[in-house]
Amino acid sequence: MTRPVAVDVEGFGWRHGGRRAWAVRGVDLRVEPGERVLLLGPSGSGKSTLLAGLAGLLSAGDAGEQEGSVRLDGVPAVRARARAGLVLQDPEAALVMARAGDDVAFGLENRGVPTADIWRRVDEALSAVGFPYGRDAATGTLSGGEQQRLALAGILALRPGLLLLDEVTANLDPAGAALVRSVLARVLAETGATAVVVEHRVEQVADLCTRAVVLSAEGGVVEDGSPVEVFARSGAALAAQGVWVPGHTPRVRRAAVSAAGAALVVARSTSFRYPGADRDALAPTDVTLREGEALAVTGSNGSGKSTLALCLAGLLRPSSGTVTAGAALDPPSDRPLWRWRGRELVSRVGTVFQDPEHQFVSATVRAELMVGPLRAGLSRPAAQARADALMERLGLARLAEANPFTLSGGEKRRLSVATAIATAPRVLVTDEPTFGQDALTWAGLVELLAGLRDDGASVVLVTHDEPLVEVLADVRLALAAAAPVPPTYAVSPTLEADRTTIPQENPSDPRESGTGAAR
Amino acid sequence: MTTTRSDVPHIDTTTAVGPAGWRTVDVVVASAIAVAFGVVFWAWGTLWNTTSAAFTAFPPAQGFMYGVWLVPGVLGMLVIRKRGAAIYTELVAAVVSALLGTPWGLSVIVYGLVEGAAPELVFAFALYRSWRLPTVLAAGAAAGVAAALLDLVFYYADWPGTWQLTYGGLLTVSSAVIAGLGSWLLVRALARTGVLATFGAGREQARV
Amino acid sequence: MSVLVPLAPDRDAALARRNPVAKLAAAFVVTAGLLVTLDPVTPAVLLGLEVLAFPLSGVRVGVLLRRAWPLFVGIAGVAVANVVAIGRGEVLADLGPLEVTTGGLGTAASVSLRLLAVTLPGIVVLATTDPMDLADALVQRWRVPARFAYGALAALRLLPLLSSDWHMIARARRARGLDAGRSPVGALRAFAGQVFAVLVAAVRRGGRLAPAMEARGFGATDVERTVARPQPMRAGDWALVAATVAAVLGATAVSVAVGSWRLPFA
């Protein structure tokens, strides 16, 4: 492959168009060819912006303004784009074409590689990342881990001397993330390319890197050395700023497991299949949500976790089976949940969606929090009082008049939880509530959810986040992965009918040995 | 799989400015808006079917339906604010709905071109400098006029003149309201969310 | 939501192998030839030729009818609108305020035949063309700027994502107590709210896709872009265009010969 690249960053700063604050500022950094740098820093320290700058994707104009310089082998990064390859967090956003081979070829076409060489390099790149299917695989139906490996192949085919990895495993389930990491380790070793790595859960990539650099939220590089040294010297300080540091998992009280209360929502043989699909998105599942109990629903991508959450929340009509309310939920009728009116649902079952933006319907944070209470029948002053109290409790008070879409990732997550609990529902269904959160907001969310559970609500956690399950879940329902379907145009999948729920033993808590199906 | 990250940089480069000053992000976002309208048109058709009883009692209903078709061109121009944005967005929206399986086949592409060209002309007459409500209403109305002309040529060439005039007037008014006023309101709301920060429509917002 | 329902899985059909721009050109030749006349003979002749050529498309008739039935409903609506509006010629039936006349029926027949003859090739072209081949051909043969062709093609990949956004937004609104209920006004208001939310998602997704494309060299002006999938105009492609032009001219000639051909509004 190509020669590893030397990086020189001098006094670099960038401010996005329309923003008053600098995304990143005052960064001085020299990276020698072949070094592999782990870039650390709290949320908002501008790690992703710096990577975009290194990739040559930032230049002054409509997009923002720049200070200082970024050079690759002495050439300004904007003119040296071909030497850098940037892999992004969300492979969904990085894939351009509908077929795998065409997607890898896309970059080669843009770089002017002769037609005769394109397909040979496509095949090389696909095999370098261990892509399990051929060129004709449909990119849209790949799993997240497969998509990310394909995105990596699209970059490797261009033979960059500088690899920039922006949280490339953050969106993946644990199995997919592990596979991508092992591919990365091999690729870095084989190419010898210079690398700059940003990763959310640092422990997962620390051993790939030879050097760690810490950016501060106030600007500039504040720490530089081998990963071991940096974690020893500044691990505690980083953890206090919310960075996930190995050995510094946030401490959260583990509430005593109380006796589970009355049944609030009961699902019986609930399954779901999309119209026209030849297999279930959710295989028939039995589960009961009880007062004062936190239920974790785990399983790999495609096992139907999110589908189950929607069914339990009354937002999706199951294809077969039922989801009904127990008497303790004070049901408005004996109809199944999916037939309830919105205003009946909102005061009983709250839902926190994976993407908080899907939930926002108002122009200000305060109005957003008043929507549910008003629909549930509260008076305007009462709804406003409740909104104000929630904002105070969740640290959103200074944002009362801000537009919800303009909040930071952590703030959006807190607001989405707040909107769901504003009506004090007895059941709270959450889909990946801790996704992408730094360690501080993570701990805050866990406290909040534990408090709701301790007050007698039923909390459902659909999640890949194993630490979350460990500190919060009273019961675990592990959904089995569906058999993988090759994403080619001609498929003949077989469905194993008896694979619904598989018990997962956890010796630390005897109650977890029961499956949802058994209860 | 979705992510929400407020710190994802909106990016452009000087090297990447191509024909008529369009950045890659302009092309992709205009196309994404058009693709979103592929979804919106489909849902609108479904909504139309489920509530048709209420609408059929109300004669201008067809004009109402028409206005929604004409939104992408005006909206695309209000977001991107570059030469050709109206024609491009409306055309891509038409192609997307053709791919989604509209029974009308390629004729919708002819419609997309003409219904995008009409508001484009209005914005061009304003030298691509006026984005205020009167201009936008005129652009919406122009799209309605174009749609009516096409319908009259394709389907109703032999109608009596009074019928033709009434039909054209109805479409023009409804499209001024839905495609004009509707797009104007949508873009104002979009700008307040901050997603348009690197586009013309977003730069008028106060810095955050 | 089912999108991109494939009408013709048979990629080896004669028409599926033709260059997309040749097919587009042919479809537009038919459209142009029929737009300039308002008679029943030209479209009837062309429609007959299209039906004869239909097996070349590799599309099965049953599949086509299932996809196209709303077209027939739409054409019927247009036909009725013409019958009731046009009072010319002999009165065949008197239905109170409405009259059915020979002139009205004649126009309705012409317009219906014309719509069928225009839309049938359009549907077949779309059904037999992969969007990516279309973008390749537009760039290579018609010099459409790559930035626009592939920008649109990349955004097309967002379709299933935005469709799923649309459904999640609807569910989230219900979870917040905002479902529309039965009133049309409520339904319209909910619809507008959903349109807004899906547009936010579209702009965000587009804003993320663009830098990912630029990170792979898209949009650079200092490099000549090469092609992975050449889309040459072969002899068969020229033959398709030539045959279509000949068919349109032939149909027009027949119509003129029998004295039926006439300009619209004339």
Image (tube, grey):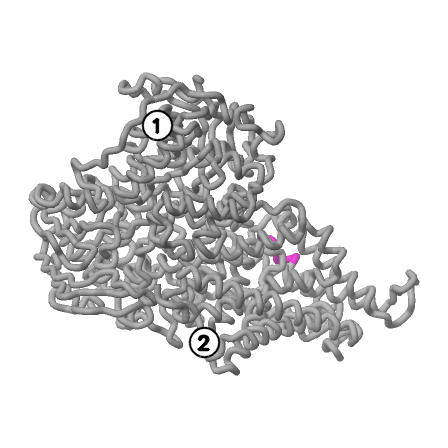
| Side (left or right) of C205 relative to A129 | right
Crowdedness near tag 2: few (<14), some (14–19) or many (≥20) residues, C-alpha within 10 Å: some
- Look at label 1 and name its amino acid: Ala
**Is residue C53 in the magenta section?**
yes
> In this rendering, does residue A301 appear at all?
yes
- Look at label 2 and name its amino acid: Arg
Q: Which residues are magenta?
A: C51-56
Element carrying mark 1: loop
Mark 2 vs mark 1, foreground winner is 1
- Name the residue located 56 percent from the left edge and 23 percent from the top edge: A327
Locate the C terminus of chain A by quadrant: top left
- The residue where tag 1 is placed is A473
Query: Which percent across, then down, holds residue C56?
Result: 57, 55
Query: Which percent across, then down, holds residue A129?
Result: 25, 45
Q: How many badges with numbers are in the image?
A: 2
**Nearer-the-camera pick, A504 or B23:** A504
Majority SS type along the magenta span: helix
**Nearer-the-camera pick, C74 or C108:** C74
| Side (left or right) of C209 relative to B115 | left
Q: Quadrant of residue C72?
A: bottom right
Q: Same chain, marks 2 and 1?
A: no
- The residue where tag 2 is placed is B83
**Is residue A216 in the magenta section?**
no
